Image: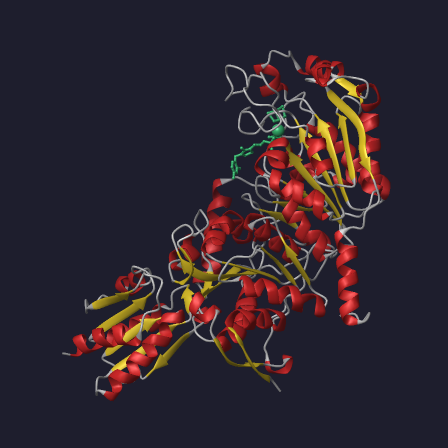
Amino acid sequence: MIKDYLLEEKLPLFWCAGCGNGIVLQAILRNIDKRGFTRENTVITTGIGCWGKADDYVTTNSFHGTHGRALPFSTGIKLANPSLNVFTLMGDGDGITIGGNHLIHAARRNVDLVAIMVNNLNYGMTGGQYSGTTPKHAITKTSPYGHVENGFDVCKVVQAAGAPFVARGTVYDVVQLDKLISKAIDHKGFSFVEVISPCPTHFGRSNKLGDAPKMMQWIKDNTISQEKAAGMTRDELQGKFVTGIFEEREQEDYSTAYQKVIDSLRGGENE
Amino acid sequence: MGEFRFMQGNEAMTEGAIAAGARFYAGYPITPSSEVAETSSIRLPQVGGLYVQMEDEIGSMAALIGASAAGKKAYTATSGPGLSLMAENLGVAVMGEIPCVLIDVQRSGPSTGLATKPAQGDVLQARWGTHGDHSIIVLSPSSVQDCFDLMVTAFNYSEKYRTPVIFLSDEIIGHLREQVILKSPEELDIFERPEPTGDPKDYRPYDHSNGLAPLSHFGSPYIFKVNGSMHDEWGRPCARPDNADRIIRHLSEKIEAHAEEIAITRRYNMDDAEIVLICYGGAARSALSAMKKAREEGIKAGVLQIVTLWPVPDQEIREAIAQAKTVIVPELNLGQYIGEVEKRNEKNIPVIGVNRIDGQPIVPAQILAEVEEAAK
Ligand SMILES: Cc1ncc(C[n+]2csc(CCOP(=O)(O)OP(=O)(O)O)c2C)c(N)n1
Ligand code: SF4
Ligand SMILES: [Mg+2]
């Protein structure tokens, strides 16, 4: 039961009404439950931010570290004990902005874990300043005249960095999101899922996207499948959220490769 | 029986760490510590351990802490610039009470400074490098043998007090080659993490009401919530003022209250010493030679070597001051530890610093000159 993984004493959630974080957390816990992962064999690591508070609500092992560093904490955890199921939760600030260097190296290093980045296009926790995914022209607390920089296409970055599983979903399409997370869990190696999610309190308000339901609609209206996107030009794709699985490829994970080194040195002897 | 070897300080640190049971290294190479990384990458897989080179020192410190929380004794090695990058996550180890050993082979700073030259400029950064009130254990080796033996002590302290320990070496000791005995496992006292007992449902990783709570690790039946934010006994976030007060005091007290137990000092010719050299690390070697020469000249000089820099060996320093007419503190910095001596100088005797900051070791003659001057 998903309830077994939810720390009820800590409810209600700290997140604003209409925030997408609760939907993503539910999807993750549903999948953990479906797999029958135990609380003891699961570790959820988080960064710092609104999404970074997800560990507050789980009964599994958890690690609440520093802003942007969830991936290297997870790397140490998984490499020290490869039998653990490690989930790494990051915001867009965590994942691609302050922690961007860790993200590309984690993708390349290919440690077997699931990384889920909730992209709400800004720093929710600190009041809605721009992040590395904030689109050009968007209004945030620190781009009051419209953002002059371009945002990352995070999945492209992670794909180029060598991750064997890369996907994007949204909180609007929960059925698809469930499937993406499920596939990410199944995939051995570094599995990355970006989830487009609303922050009605800051990004929504600053950009006059309306209340929470309207913001959900805004995400829906701007989402297109990668099949549809295939025929579109770069200009047509501006401001669109392309969803689907962009990479799904077998590749030896770090622990397996390193174990071979150990075995070759020790002739199979175990310590 | 131990094994006689001739090796470098940095290499002996790797051997010491492995002898202490460490099986995980995460780091980013930097002079003059890189040999720790290189020898670890050779040795760890041989004993079933793991070496991983991270993208920077921020990630290294994080991976180290993660591995320790997952049950492996873990260490890293760096130098000044890397120590600065490790500072934030060092605080996670402090707050999360996760054992780990951070080796800092000091070089001249600030910034890139003199990248290959010795210094002892990180003494206060080791103490206060991460933000917020906390206590920490810092050990300073002065020989290759120390690099081995004291490394075992560093891991033992780290596990026993659930704290990061900084192994504050310097370029002189890191690159020194001399004979060392690599002790065999039977000759070593290794402190192993006490496993939690009782009903896993009741396990509280931060309940220290009956002494330090035993440390769980991820994968054990005892659920472990590690939290760098202010937390309650369960590791769940808790911002109540009384809770914050309790945690901060605990983080300091769990070390300061055991300062005498943690203190390691060495006394040379101290029985009748009137001029006392208080020193540590690479500079302690020069201080010892200077003291011996002074004795040959009939000067009653002695050496109090501080091995545990933090927490400060209060009693030992006070006793030295009580018997001395003059205290001399040689350091490869502008005077970082001398402040700890001065704080305890209620007698108001002369406390004189001998300092060198040009990337060169302090030579015995420089210290001897001060001793002779004081003896006049
Ligand atoms: C080193 C550091 N710099 C800055 C901060 C302040 N800070 C906390 S959360 C955050 C941004 C969070 O944004 P994101 O990761 O996108 O998460 P969200 O709140 O949007 O879910 C910032 C800048 C911090 N905690 N640590
Ligand atoms: S500020 Fe934004 S991201 Fe944070 S909880 Fe509220 S809606 Fe969610
Ligand atoms: Mg965000």
Picture coordinates of residue B2, whole percent (x, y): 60, 84
B350 w.r.t. A33: above or below: below
Q: Quadrant of ligand 3?
A: top right
Q: Give me the residue at 64% from left, 79% from top.
A: B185
Q: Quadrant of the N terminus of chain A?
A: top right
Say which residue appears at 41% left-offset and 62% top-offset.
Answer: B117
Q: Nearer the viewer, residue B200 or B260?
A: B260
Q: What color scheme is it?
A: secondary structure
Q: Is residue B44 left or right of residue A138?
A: right
Total labels drawn: 0
Asked if A167 appears above or below A191 in the picture, the reply is above
Compared to B366, does A192 lie above or below? above
In the image, farthest residue toward the left: B376
Which of B35/B208 is in front?
A: B35
Near-viewer residue (B75 or A30) = B75
Q: Is residue A86 left or right of residue A71?
A: right
Image location of residue B92, percent across then percent down: 55, 49
* Residue B4 against residue B156 in the figure, above or below: below
Q: Residue visible at 83% across and 27% down?
A: A176
Point out residue B272 in the picture as x, y percentages from the top left corner. Answer: 26, 85
- Quadrant (top left/top right/bottom left/bottom right) for the C terminus of chain A: bottom right
Report x, y in % for residue B229.
55, 43
Is residue B319 in view? no
Residue visible at 21% across and 75% down in the picture? B369
Q: Is residue A21 visible?
A: yes
Image quadrant assignment for residue A121: top right
